Amino acid sequence: MNDADNSPYSHTPEPGEVGLVEPRDFVHPQPFTFDCGQSLPGFTLRYETYGRLNAARDNAVIVLHALSGDHHCAGIHSLNDRKPGWWNNLIGPGKAVDTNRFFVLCSNVLGGCQGSSGPSSINPATGVPYGISFPFVTVRDMIRAQKLLCDHLGITRLAGVIGGSMGGMQALQWGIEYPDFVHRVIAMATTARENAQGIAFNEVGRQAIMQDPDWNQGIYGKGGGPRVGLAIARMMAHITYLSDTSMDRKFGRRKKSAAPAASGAALDVQFEVESYLKHQGESFINRFDANSYLYITRAIDHFDLPGTYGSLEQAFAPVKAHSLVVGFTSDWLFPPEQNRHIALALLRAGKRATYAQLDTDLGHDSFLLESPQIYDLVRDFLERA
C-alpha cells in the first residue's frame, strides 16, 4: 500500500485534531545533483502526512517549514508526548487547512537535521558524518527533492503550497519550478531576496558557531559540537522573529531577582527577557545541528529571485498558480513592503495574485500564532473554486 493511503493516526483524535502521527522516511536511491554541481548517491526526506489523497490524487497541500522548523507540523507523536506540531493551529479536520478535504504533506528540508539528509548524515563512502563536505544546498534544491517525494506518493497535482519565512521562499520557488503541478501558492512573511540586514544577522549567527572551538571545522560527534555558539546564534535570531512591542508587553523590564549584592553576580541573568532568550538557546541546541544551521542560513542568504532570473517579473513568468502573499505590519525581518513587492511583481507579470497585510504587533513570527484573520485568509483561498 502506498504511504499516502495510510491513516496518519491510530486512535480517536480530539475534534479538530489530526491525532497521533508517525513520521516516515522517503529514500531516493538515485543520484541527486545539487545546484552547486555536487552530487549525492541518494538522499532521505523525513515527512508526515495528514488526511487522505482523493481518487484523482490531486488534493495534496504541501506545508513548507522555516529555518528552525521540521516535518512535524500537526498532531502529536505519542500520548506521552503531547506537544503538537508547529502549525497545529492551522491544520486539521475543519481547520483552515482542512484535512477532511486535503491531503497535507510536510517534509524536513534537504540539508536539515530531523531525519532528512544533511551535514549530520553518515557519508557512506567514509562511515562518518558529512559535516561541511555535504553539498551546498539551495532553496531550489529543497523543492526539487520534495517533488521527488510527491512523485513517490503518486501525487498528480498540488492543490496548494503554503509556508512562511523560508517556507514562503520555497512556496514561491515551487510556483516557478513546477507551474503545471501547483494550483495555489500561499507565501507569508517572506521575501524575494534576502537583503543585507538579513544576511548580516545570519552571518553573526554563523560566526558564533564557527568561532566556538567545539565546532572544529564542522567535525564533531552526536551530542557534541559548538553548543554555546549555536545557542547564541539561536538567541540572536529569535530576537529578529519578535517585535519591540511584543517583547515589551511580555517582559518589559521585569527582573528575575533583586540587584546583585556582589560585583561578580552583576553578570548573572537578571531580567526576564534574558532568561527567556537563554531558554530558547538551550532548548534549540538539543534538537538542531549546528552545521545544518550554517547550511540553511546560507540557502536563505542566496535566495535571490530577481538576481537569479534577471528580474522578479522574469522569475514569475512561468507561474500559473494563483498566489496569495501575506505581510505583517510589525515584521521587521521581512517587512510588509517586501511581501507587497512580490504580489505586485506577480501582477505586473500578468499572473493572478492577491496581497493581504495584517496589522499585528507580534513581529515576524505572526504567521505561526493564533490568528482568526490568517485562518480565514487561508481557508477562503484554498477552497476558492
Image: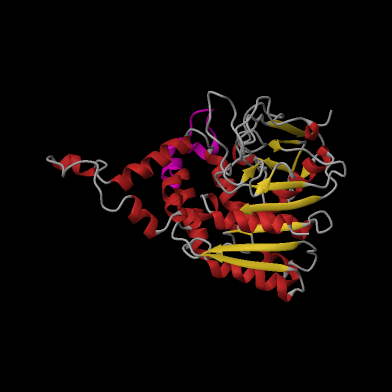
Using the rendered image of the protein, determine whether residue 226 is visible from the camera's viewpoint: no
Please report the bounds of the magenta region as a residue range: 211-233
Q: Is residue 75 left or right of residue 147?
A: left
Q: Residue at x 14, y 42 (%)?
A: 263
Assign the N terminus to one quadrant of the image: top right
**Horizontal and vertical percent position of residue 379:** 66, 54
**Which residue is the extreme one toward the bottom?**
348
Q: Tell me what residue is drawn at x 81 percent, y 59 percent.
A: 179
**Residue 305 or residue 380, whichever sits in front:** 380
Left or right: residue 193 versus residue 235 is right
Side of 309 where 276 appears, left or right:
left
* Looking at the image, residue 73 lies above or below residue 138: above
Q: Residue at x 41, y 36 (%)?
A: 282
Q: Is residue 220 above or below residue 177?
A: above
**Residue at figure coordinates x 72%, y 76% from the top left:** 348
Confirm whether the magenta stretch covers residue 219: yes
Residue 288 in view: yes
Using the rendered view, name the quadrant where residue 193 is placed. bottom right
Q: Nearer the viewer, residue 55 or 34?
A: 55
Judge by depth and name the residue closer to the eye, 26 or 201. 26
| Residue 187 drawn in magenta | no
Residue 320: name its quadrant. Answer: bottom right
Q: Position of residue 161 (x, y in %)?
A: 71, 52
Compared with residue 209, is residue 190 higher up or lower down, i.e. above or below?
below
